[in-house]
Amino acid sequence: MVLPFYKEDPNICPARTLQFYLRRTQDLRGKANALFISFKKPFKRVSAQTLSRWLKDMLHKSGINTEIFSAHSTRHASTSAAKKKGVSIDVIRKSAGWTKDSSTFARFYDRPIIQDSRSFGQAILEV
């Protein structure tokens, strides 16, 4: 995994945050080789459900409505943002852990967003 540094704003830089987290958890890790460990003894690898709960808690604390958005919503948001910024479908697939021939992004994530209800009607009429 490649995690670039976001130099424009170090306070929201994922790479910098990861370095900080690894330093803070270094003494707790022992033989644990997982990236994310629990913060309660015995400090073992956390489950996918725990990570999902942590992420949902952070979404809620950030003011995001977690009745509508879930931890999984971040996958949709990140892959859609990458596509919008011109990242190739192959890179998006690889980063999301999808196979080279996967149609998951095309089927479930790559959806045009029409901002205005009138443009929806106009788009249909132009077909």
Image (cartoon, grey):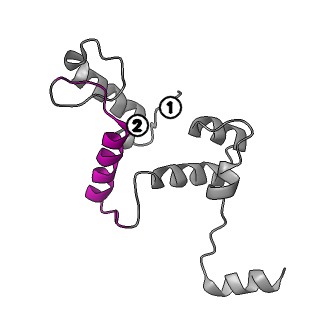
Instruction: Tell me the element at label 2.
Output: helix
Q: Which residue is drawn at 60% across and 48% down?
A: 82
Residue 87 at what x, y percent from top left?
Answer: 67, 44
Most extreme residue toward the top is 31
Circle 1: residue type: Pro
Residue 19 x/y as whole percent: 34, 26
Which residue is located at x 45 percent, y 36 percent? Answer: 7
Circles 2 and 1, Cβ within 8 Å, touching? The answer is no
Q: Which residue is under mark 2?
A: 14
Q: Of callouts 2 and 1, which one flags the residue occurring earlier in the amino acid sequence?
A: 1
Q: Is residue 43 a member of the stretch shown in magenta? A: yes
- Which type of secondary structure does the marked residue at label 1 adopt? loop
- The amino acid on which the numbered mark 2 sits, given as a three-letter code, is Pro
Please say whether residue 88 is visible from this viewpoint. Answer: no
Residue ID at (68%, 82%): 120
The answer to which image quadrant residue 126 occupies is: bottom right
Side of 40 where 8 appears, left or right:
right
For the question of whether residue 72 can be seen, the reply is yes
Task: Look at the picture and state if 121 lies above or below 49.
Answer: below
Circle 1 residue: 4
User: From which residue to which does the magenta span run?
Assistant: 42-67
Residue 63 on image: x %, y %: 30, 63
Q: How many C-alpha atoms fall within 10 Å of the one at disc 2: few (<14), some, or many (≥20)?
A: some
Residue at mark 2 to residue at mark 1: CA–CA distance: 8 Å
State the mark number for residue 123. none
Q: Which residue lies furthest to the right in this view?
A: 127
Magenta stretch encompasses residue 58: yes
> Which residue lies at the image location 40% right of the left edge and 38% below the top edge?
13
